[in-house]
Amino acid sequence: MYEEASGQLVNYNKTTVSFSKYTTAARRGQIAGWLGVRAVDEHDKYLGLPTVVGHSKQVINRVIRDKLCRKLQGWKGMLLSKARKDVLIKVVAQSIPTYAMSVFKLPSNFCDELRSLVSRFWWGSENGRRKIPWIAWAKLCQPKCLGGLGFRSFTEFNLALLGKQAWRMITDQECLMVRVLGGKYFSNRSFMKAELGTNPSYTWRGIYEANEALMVGLETV
């Protein structure tokens, strides 16, 4: 039915199914047999992020950091002009954590770490020593019309992406995400009056923090 509706073919070699710990072994085998796919304990990653996030969020940070470091290390051996570095930073390096930032509120110290990695690449090094950063990175993040280069602030970009999700909570009530989170966190009130709640999920905590910034933006419109 999926193939007929979408025109896409399912790759059964790459398709797996996982179950909750309360599902019996017999039931798991039965469902996996119906679907014609392998049963696994848990899925590894989805769109570059781990599918299961426990109490420790370091696994998310490590995935993003390692991917960014690999990109920057591959570029450091090249003779790049400032213009080329500008393009690589904006198009590739600062786009790596976009998906994670639209789902989770990353710690501010981790955003500072990402900023530091990109800053070191921008200023470069000589004989193994980092060159002097002549201008504060915050000034380089300003728009070009204000004298900056238009680089992104990871912290502000993270908040903006989560604010976009918060805006969906207000404007698209039939969205699956809104229905799921709304049913758990603000079933008897509007999103504007939602509360953080007890033991909130990592995703909801980030969207809730962006709600305050969204309210400030709405007041200025």
Image (cartoon, helix red, strand yellow):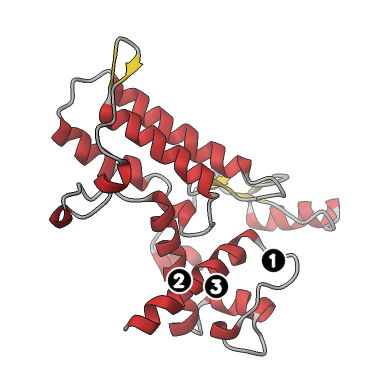
Q: Which amino acid does label 2 sit on?
A: Ala
The quadrant the C terminus occupies is: bottom left
* Front one among 85 and 181: 85
Quarter of the image holding residue 116?
Answer: top left
Residue occupying image coordinates x 39% and y 82%: 218
Q: What residue type is labelled 1?
A: Pro
Q: In the image, what residue occupies the spot 18% across and 20% down?
A: 79
Query: Which tag is nearer the camera, tag 2 or tag 3?
Result: 2
Answer with left or right where residue 7 lies relative to residue 26. Answer: left
At 44% from the left edge and 75% from the top edge, which residue is drawn?
214
On the image, which quarter does residue 81 sit in?
top left
Q: Where is residue 190 in the image (x, y as percent from the top left)?
A: 57, 88
| Residue for badge 1 | 200
Residue at image point 63% right, 52% down: 36
Q: Mark 2 points at which residue?
A: 213
Contact between labelled residues 3 and 2, with CB atoms less than 8 Å apart: no
Q: Earlier in the sequence, mark 1 or mark 2?
A: 1
The relative height of residue 93 versus residue 77 in the rendered view (above or below) is below
For disc 3, the marked residue is 177
How busy is the neighbourhood of tag 3: few (under 14 within 10 Å), some, or many (20 plus)? Answer: some
Indicate left or right for 76 with 23 as reference: left
Mark 1 vs mark 3: in front: 1
Disc number for residue 163: none
Circle 2 SS class:
helix
